[in-house]
């Protein structure tokens, strides 16, 4: 009880919790779940955009997209490292991803059908991620907060490049504008689902708020995101696919239509358009890489033995 | 020494096509750190291709840009060596191609440092730093896989047998001799406990536009948007 009191005091005084500090087991487990889920999202999230690297329409776009997807691998790396400080190995986390035990963001279970999807993923998906992630730079667990500072810097660049792709398409031909509007129509609702279930149906939220892992509720962040996007879409000259989207003077926010939560839960349960493909792609990379990892370990061991002999 | 436009395009096409091939690994690498490394190498190649195409475009004039050169030429106009357009295969084949090609590139770009065209010399200087890293990275992998496990060694032998005939083409235009290139390959193979392959030379004319069937598919994929939506800004 006393340890728990000291822990909560630190949280309340905004003192970061560090790996060697005492923490409640549930705090540790919550963080492992959240950080690994976040890391897996970065890695699985490489696939829908990776799908367009070889088809990017100009050399400049190709270079930017490749660098962006590579950044996501880097984010995965920081986040796996942050989770490892809580006593779980990267291999264990990978096994949990591949077995389906660990989740990743459902948004990546949707297909990328046109080049405009690269713009929309940057604008909406990275935009929603930033909205979720900026508060995490102040999250109570030190290694996670520090990893998120780096992640957020790069994400805001990603979002700008996505918006810029759409801006270019908006000034382009009719075919390009059609492509962009179609992509917005497909990604809008899944993007606002990225903030998670409604507050009254979000099982992990109360404790996460008390422990300052989370600082804003799902619904607060979702509203903030919708307010921003409803204005930005005007700059692009496109529309969001929600007939109920309307400024509410009294609330000082946009009202919006009903989210299809059935779709949300379906995708989480594995029935989204690309769940199987995404996981199969990760399994394939992991299994086909097994002999490479074994060879690297074997070679390092041979080197170590040689060096030991030399020193002796 | 001075390059003609075909030589310049040949250098650019090599960089673009090998960059394209390596970029296919992004998201699918055997381990996260190496996924990042090979994407980085792909980025270096694409960056190099852009520098070379931009320069070629100024020499060609007539509305050429880096993108018209990359996206609006067809197979018979591409002047890359065949080795860069071959499929990636497994990790052994991928890293060995980078090793063979980077060793060739280092020799080639050292010559370009002395090119009378200052822009070419500047591009060469920048690229050599990257090429040096690619050599170090791929050398490490040749050693690890050659002298790793029985399986990795078997895969390296297979990869070397497959790629070896295509290395001959690197020397046909006479800029680099096979002897000086071999001198960079042999010590690494020796340390990796690998024998040099004895597979035969093939008839190869990639730099004259006679390619393998693989290049058509690369271009079909790479050029799809530019071809399907002509005259658009992206």
Image (cartoon, coloured by chain):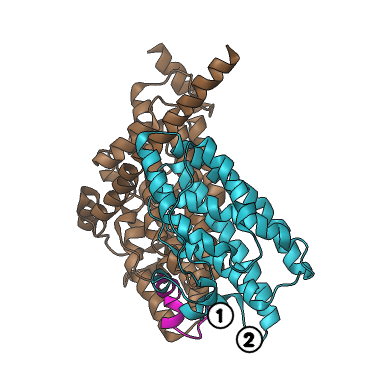
Chain colours: A brown, B cyan
* Observer-nearest of A221 and A121: A121
The quarter of the picture where the C terminus of chain A appears is top right
Q: Read off the residue under disc 2.
A: B63
Could you tell me if residue A251 is visible in this image? no
Q: Residue at x 44, y 50 (%)?
A: B160
Label ID, residue B68 = 1
Residue at 45% x, 51% y is: B198
Callout 1: few (<14), some (14-19), or many (20+) C-alpha neighbours within 10 Å?
some
The subunit carrying tag 1 is B
Magenta-highlighted stretch: main secondary structure? helix
Q: Residues within 10 Å of mark 2 (few under 14, many from 20)?
A: few
Left or right: where B216 falls relative to B124: left
- Whether B228 is among the magenta residues is yes
Q: Quadrant of residue A99?
A: top left
| A273 vs B151, nearest the viewer | B151
Q: Residue at x 72, y 63 (%)?
A: B112
Q: Which residues are magenta?
A: B218-233
The x and y percentages for residue A232 are 49, 68
């Amino acid at each position: 009880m006393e340890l728990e009191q000291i822990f909560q005091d630190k949280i309340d005084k905004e003192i970061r919790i560090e790996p060697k500090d005492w923490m409640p087991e549930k705090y540790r487990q919550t963080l492992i779940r959240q950080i690994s889920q976040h890391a897996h999202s970065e890695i699985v999230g490489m696939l829908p955009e990776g799908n367009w690297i070889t088809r990017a329409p100009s050399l400049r776009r190709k270079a930017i997209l490749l660098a962006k997807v590579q950044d996501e691998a880097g984010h995965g790396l920081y986040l796996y490292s942050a989770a490892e400080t809580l006593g779980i190995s990267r291999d264990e986390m990978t096994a949990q991803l591949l077995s389906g035990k660990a989740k990743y963001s459902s948004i990546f279970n949707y297909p990328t059908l046109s080049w405009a999807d690269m713009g929309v993923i940057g604008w909406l998906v990275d935009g929603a991620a930033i909205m979720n992630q900026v508060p995490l730079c102040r999250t109570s667990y030190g290694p996670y907060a520090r990893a998120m500072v780096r992640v957020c810097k790069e994400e805001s660049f990603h979002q700008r490049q996505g918006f810029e792709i759409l801006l270019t398409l908006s000034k382009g031909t009719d075919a390009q504008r059609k492509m962009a509007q179609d992509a917005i129509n497909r990604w809008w609702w899944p993007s606002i689902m990225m903030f998670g279930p409604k507050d009254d149906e979000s099982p992990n939220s109360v404790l996460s708020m008390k422990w300052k892992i989370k600082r804003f509720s799902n619904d607060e962040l979702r509203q903030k995101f919708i307010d921003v996007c409803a204005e930005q879409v005007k700059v692009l000259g496109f529309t969001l696919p929600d007939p109920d989207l309307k400024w509410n003077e009294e609330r000082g926010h946009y009202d919006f239509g009903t989210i299809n939560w059935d779709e949300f839960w379906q995708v989480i349960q594995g029935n989204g358009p690309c769940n199987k493909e995404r996981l199969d792609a990760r399994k394939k990379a992991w299994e086909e890489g097994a002999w490479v990892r074994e060879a690297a370990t074997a070679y390092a061991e041979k080197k170590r033995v040689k060096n030991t002999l030399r020193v002796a | 020494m001075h390059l003609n436009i075909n030589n310049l395009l040949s250098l650019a096409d090599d960089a673009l096509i090998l960059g394209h091939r390596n970029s296919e690994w992004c998201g699918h690498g055997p381990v996260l750190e190496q996924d990042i490394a090979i994407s980085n190498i792909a980025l270096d190649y694409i960056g190099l291709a852009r520098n070379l195409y931009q320069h070629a475009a100024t020499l060609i004039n007539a509305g050429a840009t880096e993108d018209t050169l990359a996206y609006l030429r067809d197979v018979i106009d591409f002047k890359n060596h065949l080795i860069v357009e071959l499929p990636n295969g497994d990790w052994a084949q991928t890293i060995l191609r980078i090793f063979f090609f980077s060793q060739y590139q280092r020799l080639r770009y050292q010559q370009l440092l002395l090119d009378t065209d200052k822009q070419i010399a500047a591009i060469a200087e920048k690229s050599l730093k990257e090429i040096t890293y690619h050599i170090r990275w791929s050398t490490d992998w040749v050693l690890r896989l050659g002298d790793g496990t029985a399986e990795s060694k078997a895969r390296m032998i297979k990869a070397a047998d497959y790629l070896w005939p295509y290395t001959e083409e690197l020397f046909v235009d006479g800029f680099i001799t096979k002897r000086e290139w071999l001198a960079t390959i042999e010590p690494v193979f020796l340390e990796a406990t690998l024998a040099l392959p004895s597979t035969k030379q093939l008839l190869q004319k990639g730099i004259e536009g006679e390619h393998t069937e693989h290049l058509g598919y690369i271009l079909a994929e790479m050029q799809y948007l530019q071809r399907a939506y002509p005259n658009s800004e992206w």
